[in-house]
Image (tube, helix red, strand yellow):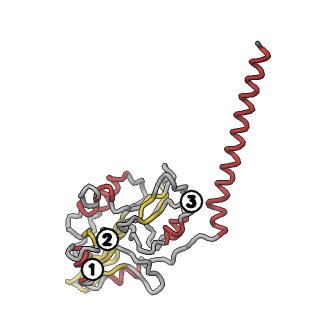
Amino acid sequence: MSKYAMVIDMDRCIACHACEVACRSHYDVPVPYYRNWVHDLRPEGVYPDIKKVSYAGLCNHCDDAPCVKACPTGATYKRKDGVVVVDKDLCIGCGLCIEACPYGARYIDPVKEKVDKCDFCIDRVEQGVEPACVATCIASARIFGDIDDPNSKVSQLIASGAQPNVSSKVNVGPNIYYLDSHNHFPVVQAAFPPKIPNMPTPQKMWTKVLRPLFWLAIGGSFLGQLAAFSTQLFKGESDIKE
């Protein structure tokens, strides 16, 4: 069984944002949300050896994914190939998984009212095609593949020193790795450290899940009774006329 991962080569990335555009186009991502992004940071180095540092990010498809634990309906789950996905039929848009994500990689679609995020373009991968962001990267800064295959390029780059964005407080086994030969990665980690997962509490579960479902059930029951009463009333009037 494959386990998918991605390496982002910070030395190659030119922050052209083509990956963002490809992703937004492929999935019709509404503004101002992103399934993957590139944040431009301050330049690093001393003239003439100066390089602009950028942070290319997306869902990290963590081994110990807090979003999976936070989801009350099982809508967010991890596939056997390591890809974390969202079942839109089960998602109730409570947002608990968004609060739990250390990388800010999730949003609620304002139209569909469902959580969305990067899924490694698994629909493309299953057809033997690279994720849209990888295929579009003009600098070949994104490398995608099977981390469990020692002969894959992504596996070899990880073995050569590519590292995930983790901290002493947060390490949930992310599967996005960064390759950096200029020691700029610490700048990214300082600017965008993984946040401690904000996991659901009983109060949050009541506020965001149970109470809305309770009132939905009450409303559904009331409408059902109203419909039954109306039908009976209409039937009674028909019987009187006859």
Secondary structure, mark 3, is loop
Residue that lies at the very extreme toward the top in this rendered image: 242
Residue 9, percent from left and from top:
25, 75
Splitting the image into 4 quarters, where does residue 189 fall?
bottom left
Q: Is residue 153 above or below residue 88?
A: below
Task: Tell me whether the residue at label 2 lies in contact with that at label 1, contact meaning CB atoms closer than 8 angstroms.
Answer: yes
User: Which disc, if any, is residue 158?
Assistant: 1
Give the residue at mark 3: 94
Pointer 2 residue: 5
Question: Within 10 angstroms of label 3, few (less than 14), some, or many (20 or more) residues?
Answer: many
Residue in the image at 32% along x and 76% along y: 177
Residue at mark 2 to residue at mark 3: CA–CA distance:
28 Å
* Amino acid on which the number 1 mark rests in the picture: Ile
Query: What's the residue at 24%, 81% (across, down)?
Result: 50
164 displayed left or right of 229: left
| Marks 2 and 3 close (CB-CB < 8 Å) | no
Q: How crowded is mark 1: few (under 14 residues within 10 Å), some or many (20 or more)?
A: some
